[in-house]
Image (cartoon, rainbow, N blue to C red):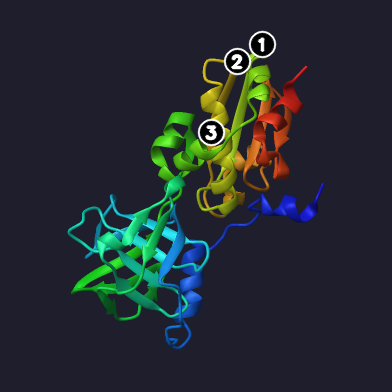
């Protein structure tokens, strides 16, 4: 097994309240940087689940937050076209308002943004505790870490509660021949997935097994998902099942544990499942 690849698929220790908040906090501690040259069009903005947007103390659940994997810029898409999209540049601590017409939807749910010209440039953001705070036209805007999903969920509940997980599940293409074999398994199989919505590896890997679970609906395989908090070492369910890292899938056949999905198993979970329960 490739050790570095294995570790990249795990969250062994709790992270700070959002990777982006940590990045913003580091940059906020430094002097405001001069705005560096950047491309007129920014691509690769992907929907994320890290934050809740609050305006003047009221949560705005319909607002969506995207992050660019290329620049780490954060894009806030408001609930209506009456408010402009907001672009936050961590390295420069710059906050900008954009024209709604400059944001374009791409394939796969990604967005691209034309950043020239901008409607307005605002005062630099501040980091207050775990919140990113800035002012837009006299309104206080906050990016607050979203509370993690805790406890037991089924597949439908997971897809309903996380648009990010739902989109990524839809994008995964499992091996159909392996699914066909799994659908013919007669033994009662239960898969319990331990995960954390605060864990980047879970955000990439758990949607894959959600896709597999949907496709195997009606078979003898059942799937359940247990959300853990940050610092899950004190969680009773994690202790009961000796969970040291997430994501971890515990596989039971006729109520007897036969193996686990960990590390590289998540790259193609249907194949890993078949290796454990196939005959």
Question: Disc 2 on helix, strand or loop?
Answer: loop
The first of marks 2 and 1 along the sequence is: 1
Other-residue count near label 2 (Cα within 10 Å), few / some / many at <14 / 14–19 / ≥20 = some
Disc on res. 220: 2
The first of marks 3 and 1 along the sequence is: 1
Write the residue at 44% across / 30% down.
Answer: 156
Q: Quadrant of the C terminus?
A: top right
Q: Identify the residue at the far top of this view.
A: 186
Percent across and percent down for residue 84 are 24, 64
Q: Nearer the viewer, residue 143 or 244?
A: 143
Write the residue at 49% across / 61% down.
Answer: 18
Question: Disc 1 on helix, strand or loop?
Answer: loop
Disc on res. 74: none
Q: Nearer the viewer, residue 6 or 235?
A: 6
Image height of 136 relative to 43, above or below: below
Kindly identify which residue carries mark 1: 186
Q: Nearer the viewer, residue 85 or 104?
A: 104
Q: Is residue 92 visible?
A: yes
Disc on res. 210: 3
Asked where in the image residue 141 lies, by quadrant, the reply is bottom left
Find out whether the residues at labels 2 and 1 contact each other: C-beta distance under 8 Å: yes
Image height of 154 relative to 119, above or below: above
Asked where in the image residue 260 lies, by quadrant, the reply is top right
Percent across and percent down for residue 6 are 74, 50
Q: CA distance from mark 3 to mark 1?
A: 21 Å
Other-residue count near label 3 (Cα within 10 Å), few / some / many at <14 / 14–19 / ≥20 = many
């Amino acid at each position: 097994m490739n050790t570095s690849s294995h570790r990249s698929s795990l969250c062994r220790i709790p992270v700070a309240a959002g990777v982006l908040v940590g990045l913003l906090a580091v940059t906020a501690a430094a002097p405001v940087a001069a705005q560096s040259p950047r491309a007129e069009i920014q691509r690769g903005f992907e929907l994320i689940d890290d934050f809740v947007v609050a305006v003047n103390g009221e949560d705005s659940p319909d607002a969506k937050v995207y992050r660019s994997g290329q620049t780490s810029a954060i894009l806030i898409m408001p609930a209506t076209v009456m408010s402009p999209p907001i672009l936050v540049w961590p390295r420069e601590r710059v906050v900008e308002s954009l024209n709604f017409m400059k944001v374009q939807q791409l394939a796969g749910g990604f967005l691209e943004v034309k950043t020239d010209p901008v409607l307005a440039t605002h005062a630099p953001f501040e980091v207050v505790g775990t919140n990113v705070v800035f002012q837009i036209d006299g309104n206080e805007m906050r990016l607050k870490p979203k509370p993690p999903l805790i406890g037991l969920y089924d597949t439908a509940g997971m897809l309903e509660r996380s648009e990010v997980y739902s989109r990524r599940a839809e994008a995964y293409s499992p091996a159909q021949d392996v699914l066909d074999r799994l659908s013919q398994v007669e033994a009662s199989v239960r898969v319990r997935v331990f995960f954390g919505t605060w864990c980047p590896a879970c955000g990439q890997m758990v949607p894959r097994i959600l896709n597999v679970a949907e496709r195997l609906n009606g078979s003898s395989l059942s799937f359940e998902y247990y959300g853990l908090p940050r610092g899950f070492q004190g969680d009773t369910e994690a202790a009961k099942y000796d969970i040291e890292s997430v994501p971890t899938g515990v596989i039971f056949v006729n109520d007897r544990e036969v193996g686990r999905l960990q590390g590289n198993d998540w790259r193609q979970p249907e194949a890993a499942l078949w290796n454990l329960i196939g005959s």
